Image (cartoon, rainbow, N blue to C red):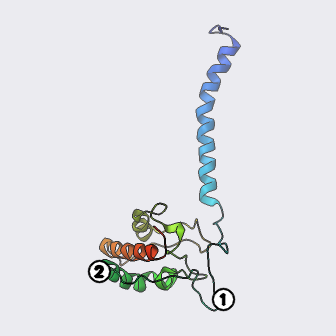
Amino acid sequence: MMTAPGSSRAFQDKKMKKFLPVAALALAALGGAYYLTRPPVPLTQNDTQIDPDDESIVEVTLPAELSGPAQIGKRAFDGTCAACHGANASGRIGYGPPLVHKVYEPGHHGDMAFYMAVQNGVRAHHWPFGDMPAQSGLTRADVSDIIAYVREMQRANGID
């Protein structure tokens, strides 16, 4: 059935064509707002092995040896990151998440996420520790070595 150009049906169709993109944009904005403000995903017993006498969040198996860049990265990590992310990137209860965890596997948090976290900080989104502030005093090369260390630690713990 054809609708005459001046009919009310044609007018309604024209209004609907203008309304749909606005509605889609509004839904996308609401979805984005929810994503940014939703509560962090809590740790579950399956995700952690917490010893009440230890502040580490996960148990970490150390690799047999570290590459040269990872050895340098470990020193930088220990000096800058371990205060919150724990010894051997095992996390610290009340301070920061473990980086030796499936959440930080390369397919979910690529290397660029680490560079950006150091440079810009990170809004809390996976863990209930609060926002991570930007870290000063680290060069891009330092961060590359830290990433090498974290990735080797992850691989030693079955996280690829």
Which residue is nearer to you in this view: 5 or 85?
85
Q: Is residue 124 left or right of residue 159?
A: right
Please say if 68 is above or below 120. Answer: below
Quadrant in the rendering for residue 134: bottom left
The label on residue 68 is 2
Dividing the picture into quadrants, the one containing residue 12 is top right
Q: Which mark is residue 38?
A: none
Q: Which residue is mark 1?
A: 52
The residue positioned 63% from the left and 87% from the top of the image is 51
Q: Are marks 1 and 2 in contact (CB under 8 Å)?
A: no
Provide the secondary structure element on which disc 2 rests. helix
Residue 48, given in percent of the width and then of the height, sits at 61, 77
Would residue 27 appear left or right of 82 to someone viewing this image? right
Q: What is the CA distance from the residue labelled 1 to the residue labelled 2?
A: 34 Å
**Res. 147 visible in picture:** yes
Q: Residue at x 32, y 82 (%)?
A: 72
The crowd level at tag 2 (other Cα within 10 Å; few <14, some 14-19, many 20+) is few
